Amino acid sequence: MPRMTVNERPLEFDMDPETPLLWALRDAANLTGTKYGCGNGDCGACMVLVDGAALRSCLITLEEAEGRFITTIEGLSRDRSHPVQQALVAEQAIQCGFCTPGIAMAAANLIQRNAAPSEAEIKEAIPNLCRCGVYPRLVSAIERAGRVVRRQETISAAPAPGISAEDAAAAVPALRGRPRSTGQ
C-alpha cells in the first residue's frame, strides 16, 4: 500500500499503486480542492506540490508518489492566509474558481523559488488553463504576492471560509426578497 505524507500527515492508501494521485487525494483522502480538469496534464486544475515542485496529480501514480511529501490547496494554508491566496482575492483574479486551486499551487511554488518574478517568468511558471480568462489579473496577483513575501506590502485578510445564506443574501442584492419555495 503506497505511503506518503499529505499536508504534513502520513497517509497510506489501500488502492492500486497505478491509481493517479489525483483520485487518491479526492476519493480516498477527501481533499476535493484538487480538481479534475482534463485527466491528461494539459489544464493544471489538479496541480499539487510534490516534494516542493508543482506537478499535475493526474499524471503521477500512487506508486510514483510513494514516500514523497504532497501539499494540496487544503495544506497551503487552512485559513487562506498564504500570500498567493490573499493576492488572488485582493486582485479579483478568481472567477468561477475551478482552476484557482491549481493556479494557487503553481503560483505558490513560483513565489517560493522567486519572490520577485518578472511577467515572463510568471507566464512560464503558470501553465494552467483558465476558461474565464483571468490572466492579466493573475499576473498582477502573483506580483503582489511576491511583494507581500518580500515584506514590501500587506494585504487585508480575505473573508473567513464559509458564509451563511442570510449573509450571502444581504451582500448580493439579487438574492434579497426572493420568494421561498413552498415545495409544491
Image (spheres, helix red, strand yellow):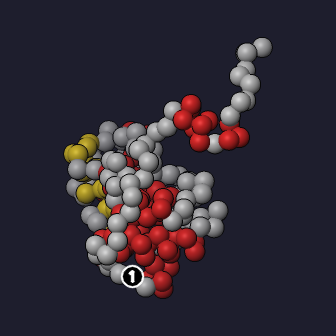
Instruction: Depth check: give the residue in front, 7 or 100.
Output: 100
Q: Quadrant location of the N terminus?
A: top left
Screen quadrant of the C terminus: top right
Name the residue located 23 percent from the left edge and 50 percent from the top edge. 8
Q: Is residue 72 visible?
A: no
- Indicate the quadrant where residue 160 lies: top left
Where residue 27 sits, quadrant-wise, is: top left
Q: Residue at x 63, y 42 (%)?
A: 172
Q: Is residue 156 above or below residue 183?
A: below
Give how far across and how far down residue 77 sits, in percent. 32, 52
Residue 95 placement, left or right of 64: right
- Percent of width and height locating residue 166: 56, 31
Question: In the drawing, does residue 137 fall left or right of residue 132?
Answer: left
Q: Residues within 10 Å of mark 1 (few under 14, many from 20)?
A: some
Q: Return the residue at label 1.
A: 117
Tell me if residue 152 can be seen.
Answer: yes
Residue found at x 45% / y 78%: 122
Q: Position of residue 10 (x, y in %)?
A: 21, 45
* In this rendering, position of residue 72 left or right of residue 137: left
In the foreground, 135 or 167: 167
Three-letter amino acid code at the position of disc 1? Pro
Q: Label 1: state its secondary structure.
A: loop
Relative placement, left or right, of 60 versus 7 is right
